[in-house]
């Protein structure tokens, strides 16, 4: 598996954990609000990281293509 697929799996696991913690908070076995926030924030940060990584890869490819085009002309 590549890094993007692993990050996507981790994000989905964190989303499920955040939903479970939220349901526990509602129905009584209350985890703290900090635990809920950590689960949600880590999930968002990983998702943002994966998007930024994809953009970085595309920019690298584009700059490589531009350099090759520049040298060919």
Image (cartoon, grey):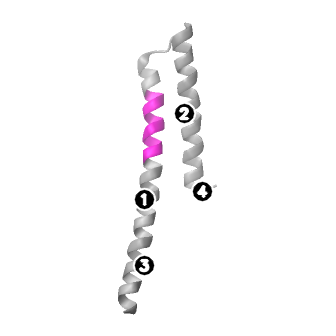
Q: Which mark is residue 65?
A: 3
Q: Which mark is residue 34?
A: none
User: Dots 2 and 3: beta carbons under 8 Å?
Assistant: no
What's the CA distance linking mark 2 and mark 1? 23 Å
User: Dots 1 and 4: beta carbons under 8 Å?
Assistant: no
Residue at mark 2: 14
- Which is more foreground, mark 1 or mark 4? 1
Mark 4, secondary structure of its residue: loop
Residue at mark 1: 55
The magenta region covers: 38-48
- Mark 2: give few (<14), some (14-19) or many (20+) Cα within 10 Å: many
User: Dots 2 and 1: beta carbons under 8 Å?
Assistant: no
Verify whether residue 2 appears in magenta: no
- Point out the tag, 4 or 3, that comes first from the N-terminus: 4
What's the CA distance linking mark 2 and mark 3? 37 Å
Mark 2, secondary structure of its residue: helix
- Point out the tag, 3 or 1, that comes first from the N-terminus: 1
What's the CA distance linking mark 2 and mark 4? 19 Å
Q: What main secondary structure does the magenta stretch of the protein show?
A: helix
Residue at mark 4: 2
What's the CA distance linking mark 1 and mark 4? 16 Å
- Mark 1: give few (<14), some (14-19) or many (20+) Cα within 10 Å: few
Mark 1, secondary structure of its residue: helix
Rendered residue at 40%/85% (across/down): 69
Rendered residue at 56%/16% (across/down): 23
Q: Quadrant of the N terminus?
A: bottom right
In the image, residue 39 above or below residue 71: above
Q: Where on the picture, by quarter, is residue 33?
A: top left
In the image, residue 13 above or below residue 60: above
Q: Position of residue 31 (x, y in %)?
A: 49, 15
Verify whether residue 39 appears in magenta: yes
């Amino acid at each position: 598996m590549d890094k993007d697929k692993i990050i996507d799996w981790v994000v989905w696991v964190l989303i499920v954990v955040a939903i479970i913690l939220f349901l526990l908070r509602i129905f009584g076995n209350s985890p703290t609000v900090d635990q809920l926030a950590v689960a949600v924030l880590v999930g968002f940060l990983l998702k943002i990281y994966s998007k930024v990584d994809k953009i970085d890869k595309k920019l690298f490819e584009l700059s490589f293509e531009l350099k090759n085009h520049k040298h060919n002309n």
